[in-house]
Image (tube, helix red, strand yellow):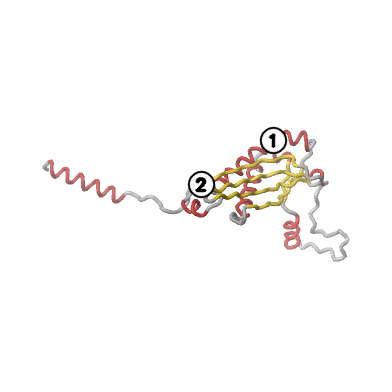
Amino acid sequence: MTRTTCITVAILALSLSVSCAPKGQSSGRIPISETTAAEVKAGGPYTADLATASDEVATSLVRDINRLTDEDWDGYRVTLIYGDIVNKTAGRVSTVDFEYVRDRILSLLSKNKSFRDNVKFVRKRARIESLNREELDGSSDPLQEGNDPNKVVRPDAEYVYYLNGDMYGIYRGSTELFYMKFSIDNARDAEVVFSEDYEVKYAR
């Protein structure tokens, strides 16, 4: 085989290997930390920033658990209830985005033993009472005597707290700033015993 023939065969083999190489995916699963062109175009907080916000709030809460237990809760295992989310983004961001952040915070905290030992997470009472009526076949309280078997009993308000969220959006032309704050507020006197925020700014 001549040198020219060898070169021709080599080039042909290389072209075949390139043509048979797998192409990169244009869709499908991507890392949470990766921002897509669709997100940039849509506006609002990137999903990666929502995940990061939940990470930072959960980390701060775990770091602060000893102070809360000693100074505010007197060693008592308190009840933490899903609170309200106040969305002040002028309708540009769905409240569902912020509910995702809150639920992710609670999911991360539930994996920490120190927090589980000192805090009991519970959902809003109305949701559980509705399930009780459907699943436990409890009778209602027609005489309104306070004996409804579906009613969820809460401890003293002194040891009941809410995880509340406040969300803000500030817009200046093509610039967007989003501010998220989560706090733990006492049910009896509305004292804020914990607060952590996260903010991010975009130039579109």
Q: Which residue is mark 2?
A: 203
Along the viewing direction, whichever of 152 and 31 lies nearer the viewer: 31
Q: Residue at x 62, y 52 (%)?
A: 89
Q: Quadrant of the N terminus?
A: top left
Q: Residue at x 75, y 42 (%)?
A: 192
Categorize mark 2 by other alpha carbons within 10 Å: few (<14), some (14-19), many (20+): few
Q: Along the polypeptide, which appears first: circle 1 or circle 2?
A: 1
157 left or right of 20 in image: right
In the rendered image, the vertical position of residue 124 relative to residue 196, given as above or below: below
Along the viewing direction, whichever of 169 and 59 lies nearer the viewer: 169
144 left or right of 127 in image: right
In the orientation shown, which residue stands out farthest toward the bottom?
A: 142
Q: Nearer the viewer, mark 1 or mark 2?
A: 2
Q: Which residue is mark 1?
A: 64
In the rendered image, the vertical position of residue 173 relative to residue 60, given as above or below: below
141 left or right of 26 in image: right
Task: Give how far across and how far down residue 126 sits, in percent.
Answer: 75, 57
Residue 11 found in image quarter: top left
Along the viewing direction, whichever of 131 and 188 lies nearer the viewer: 188
Task: Give how far across and how far down residue 187 sits, in percent.
Answer: 79, 47
Along the viewing direction, whichever of 48 and 121 lies nearer the viewer: 48
